[in-house]
Amino acid sequence: MLAFLTRMLLKYIVYGHGLLKSEFYHAFKHGPSNDIFNTPDKVEHSKKRKRLANIFSAQSVFAFEPRVREHIRQLCAQWDLRCRESACGVSGDNWSANDGKAVIDLCAQISYLAFDIIGDLALGSCFGLIQAQKDSSLSIESVNAFGDPQRGTIEIPVVKTIVRGGVSMMGIGVFPAWTHRFLQYFPWNLVGLFDSLNFFKLATTSVHGRIKRGPKEVIQDGKRSIDIMEKLLEVEEDGRPLPTHELTAEAIVLLIAGSDTISSTLGCLFYHLATNPRVQRELQIELDQHIPFQTSSEPHGKEGLDIRLHDTVVRYDDVKALPYLEACIKEALRLQSPTATGLPRVVPPGNGVIVSGEPFKPGSIISVPLYTIHHSSVWGSDAADFRPEQWLDDKCGLLSKYFQPFSLGPRTWIGRNFAYMNLMLSAATLARRYKIEALHTTKPMTYEGFLRSTISCEVMIKRRKV
């Protein structure tokens, strides 16, 4: 496979001149149905994309906001408890007190948030990672007639399974499709395989349960929240509802793509805010100016986890147009590049193509690594630095054409509107409520499979005094 490193060729390779998805994507197929990501057929992809387009339109994603805000509130309750205990010098199971501040694994906490949000919306029930404060969700053996889960005893490491699966699939996908089934049984893939099988059973059973029990009523400010599954259940094909295996396939790909993109981007953002206090202060100044922090006595129960949603989690309408917040999120997306690898395309039968002056015969596989584009010289000699200000100056329009975190064209990630809403709500709420500081050991650990995942990064947090 040959990789090209320019934005113009990204446009050419990904959706120009009839180039097709390669056999690489076959490795990402789970179950009997293709999903919107792995289908190689353009007609099938167009049909699947049309199903989801309305669900993820800029207007439709507002309906998901109440659910997103509730999970952010739950994370804030956990962080508030740690800040309160650490101020008294008390450490806990997954935090330690340091000079009155709580030392936490930022990336783990953000992953709990992202996976609970997407699990709730895509599967109809969250994994409970925020409440459990660990990467573990009990298996579901079955659901009863009312859709209630009958939990098993197997603990599934949801976050680790997705990360490890991406690494395995990346290694398997480069081989011919007929070998994929056998390669997954190689010794170094077995642990990931068994975890993946348990995870997909959990996801499939969750979808069955969600269908049986119907939608969950979540009402905030007089608005009823819906989930993605409710919208998928409204889709009909030839006058009939989508079969369960189709619903499951789309739910799983949305879960994997959405959760990892959001958790890795937020992990990258807060690492850079912790190591760049000036940027953190600038962001907090903007947030304080537009969303005044009303000091209130927040009630809490015996465990200190019962805090009010009011004045804790921002509203999307209040933050969606804040320029410095948007600049910080864009810069995190640029530096992190959720899909860091190229998106392989194969030259179809015929006369071949010419790319960058070079001829390629049918069957050639070519790609454009997004991470490389986002770190190329067009961003300057300091392309590896976190510089949100570059999104606010006169050159912003020129740089935007090189900024493609969700790819582009018909194959661009369909959930980007939801991702931006989620990123803005989470980033604004946490940056406004907490001061985040780096330790001398603070450094993110990153795994790169198909997705580029930040999996560990220790920082110190404390409640802000405004």
Image (cartoon, rainbow, N blue to C red):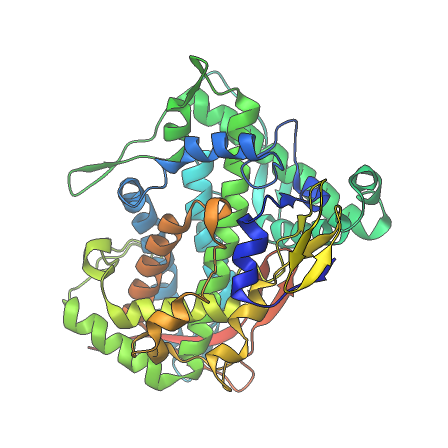
Q: Nearer the viewer, residue 383 or 188?
A: 383
Residue 267 visible in the picture: yes
Give x and y (percent) for residue 35. Answer: 57, 35
Q: Nearer the viewer, residue 370 or 331?
A: 370
Q: Residue at x 19, y 38 (%)?
A: 223
Give x and y (percent) for residue 389. Answer: 33, 80
Give x and y (percent) for residue 189. Answer: 79, 49
Marks counted in the figure total 0
Q: Residue at x 38, y 67 (%)?
A: 329
Give the quadrant of residue 414: top left
Q: Is residue 209 above or below residue 220?
A: above
Where's the N terminus, which quadrant? bottom right
Where's the C terminus, which quadrant? bottom left
Image side of residue 254 versus residue 175, left or right: left
Give x and y (percent) for residue 75. Answer: 38, 57
Q: Is residue 46 above or below residue 387?
A: above
Q: Residue at x 68, y 56 (%)?
A: 366
Give the quadrant of residue 22: top right
Q: Residue at x 31, y 34 (%)?
A: 226
Residue 132 visible in the picture: no
Give the quadrant of residue 235: top left
